[in-house]
Image (cartoon, grey):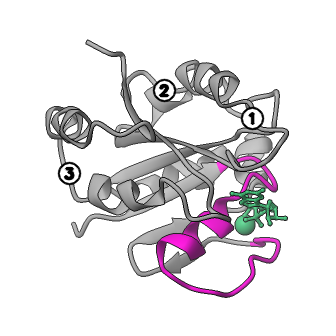
Amino acid sequence: MKNRVMIIGGVQAGKSTLMNALLGKERQANKTQALVYDEWIVDTPGEYIENPMYYRNIMATSLEVTHVIYLQDATSARSVFPPQFSLGIPKIQIGVITKMDSPLADVERAITLLKNVMTQGSIVKTSALQKEGIEFIAPLIQLATEQDIRQFVKDCNSPYLMYYPQQ
Ligand SMILES: Nc1nc2c(ncn2[C@@H]2O[C@H](COP(=O)(O)OP(=O)(O)OP(=O)(O)O)[C@@H](O)[C@H]2O)c(=O)[nH]1
Ligand SMILES: [Mg+2]
């Protein structure tokens, strides 16, 4: 399978804006109504994770990807993911925090929320709007093992990138 990532996260969390930034598309994100496949990304509507009725769609779609991005909005105090949600999806997990540019952003809180969702993996701090931190995401999608990802994070030595758990 060619490497491909599914982005999941709450309604208005910034999934489509992130996808557009990653693909270098200048289009404005509108409300996502259904799955959107574009190049190496699958964008999902926020309702898919906010409403358990749609979990089966997430599970089915996960069969078509190698990686899953768990997106956490840095301005939100809540997580839309059930605790340890990533345990149910046997794909490479990448945590992405977005909207770090916002005055309302609390990046440390977002990291804590992601650690409740993910069992392990890289966490990337980004602003899709300012295109900060997003340059690490495409290379991560090229890596097939946690060992390689851990090494990549170490080699990058960037404030935008961390690995959880640390050791
Ligand atoms: N400040 C800031 N705002 C952002 C950022 N990314 C997205 N937004 C804003 O957040 C809102 C929602 O963005 P979308 O990308 O449509 O969110 P989504 O997760 O795709 O939403 P659904 O498709 O409804 O699930 C928009 O008003 C964006 O401009 C960011 O990095 N920083
Ligand atoms: Mg969307």
Q: Earlier in the sequence, mark 1 or mark 3?
A: 1
Tag 3: amino acid: Leu
* Residue 56 drawn at (x, y percent): 61, 48
Main SS category, magenta section: loop
What amino acid type should be assigned to the residue bearing mark 1?
Answer: Val
> From which residue to which does the magenta span run?
9-33
Ligand 1 quarter of the rendering: bottom right
Quadrant for the N terminus, please. Answer: bottom left
Instruction: Check mark 1 vs ligand 1: CB closer than 8 Å? yes or no.
Output: no
In terms of image quadrants, where is residue 106?
top right
Image disc number at residue 51: none
Residue lying furthest top:
167
Residue 122 visible within the image: no
Q: Which mark is residue 80?
A: 1
Q: Tell which circle, 1 or 2, labels the residue nearer the N-terminal end.
A: 1
Residue with the mark numbered 2: 118
Q: Is residue 53 left or right of residue 67?
A: right
Is 19 in the magenta?
A: yes
> Where is mark 3, residue-wise?
143
> Where does the C terminus fall, quadrant-wise?
top left
Residue 43 in percent (x, y) is at 59, 66
What's under tag 2, amino acid-wise?
Met
How far apart in space, not on screen, are marks 1 and 2 (Cα)? 13 Å
Q: Is residue 72 visible in this depiction of the protein?
A: yes
